[in-house]
C-alpha cells in the first residue's frame, strides 16, 4: 500500500506544482475538463488519499515486524 500511496501523492504534487507553469501530467489531463475548481479538488483529494495509504501501509509494516 505504501507504493500506491506514494505514487498518488507524487503525481498529485507534480500536478499541483506543474499547474503553476501551465503544464499538466498526461495521466491527470482529464480532470481539467471539469473546470479549475474540480481539478483542484481532485488533486488535493489524491494527495490526501495517497498520504493516508502511505501511512496505513507503514503502520501495517510495523505491526508485522
Image (cartoon, rainbow, N blue to C red):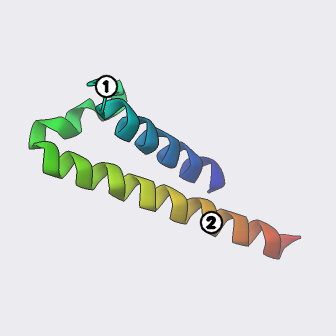
As drawn, the residue found furthest toward the front would be 20
- Say whether residue 39 is left or right of residue 57: left
Quarter of image, res 2? bottom right
Crowding at dot 2, Cα within 10 Å, few <14 / some 14-19 / many 20+, comes out as some
Total residue callouts:
2
Q: Residues within 10 Å of mark 1 (few under 14, many from 20)?
A: few
Residue ID at (39%, 53%) = 46
- Disc number placed over residue 42 in the picture, else none: none
Q: Estimate the x, y position of residue 15 in percent, counting from the top left.
A: 37, 36
Q: Residue at x 72, y 71 (%)?
A: 60
CA gap between label 2 and label 1 equals 30 Å
**Disc 2 designates what residue?**
55
Left or right position of 44 against 29 = right
Left or right: residue 53 versus residue 65 is left
* Sooner in the amino-acid sequence: mark 2 or mark 1: 1
- On residue 21, which mark appears? 1
Q: x, y (%) of residue 36?
A: 15, 44
Quarter holding the N terminus? bottom right
Residue lying at the far right of the rendered structure: 65
Work out whether residue 32 or residue 62 is closer to the camera in this orientation and state it. 32
Marks 2 and 1: CB-CB under 8 Å?
A: no
Element on which disc 2 rests: helix
Tell me if residue 27 comes above or below residue 3 in the rendering: above
Q: Secondary structure at mark 1?
A: loop
* Residue at the image position 58 percent from the left and 48 percent from the top: 6
Q: Position of residue 4 (x, y in %)?
A: 56, 49
Point 30% across, 32% down: residue: 20
**Image: 30 above or below 3:** above
Residue 19 image point, x, y percent: 30, 33
For the C terminus, give its image quadrant: bottom right
Q: Is residue 38 left or right of residue 41?
A: left
Of the residues tagged 2 and 1, which is closer to the observer?
Answer: 1
Amino acid at each position: 500500500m505504501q507504493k500506491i500511496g506514494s505514487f498518488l501523492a507524487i503525481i498529485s504534487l507534480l500536478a499541483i506544482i506543474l499547474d503553476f507553469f501551465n503544464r499538466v501530467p498526461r495521466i491527470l489531463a482529464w480532470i481539467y475538463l471539469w473546470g479549475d475548481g474540480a481539478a483542484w479538488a481532485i488533486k488535493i483529494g489524491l494527495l490526501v488519499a495517497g498520504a493516508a495509504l502511505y501511512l496505513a501501509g507503514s503502520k501495517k509494516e510495523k505491526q508485522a515486524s
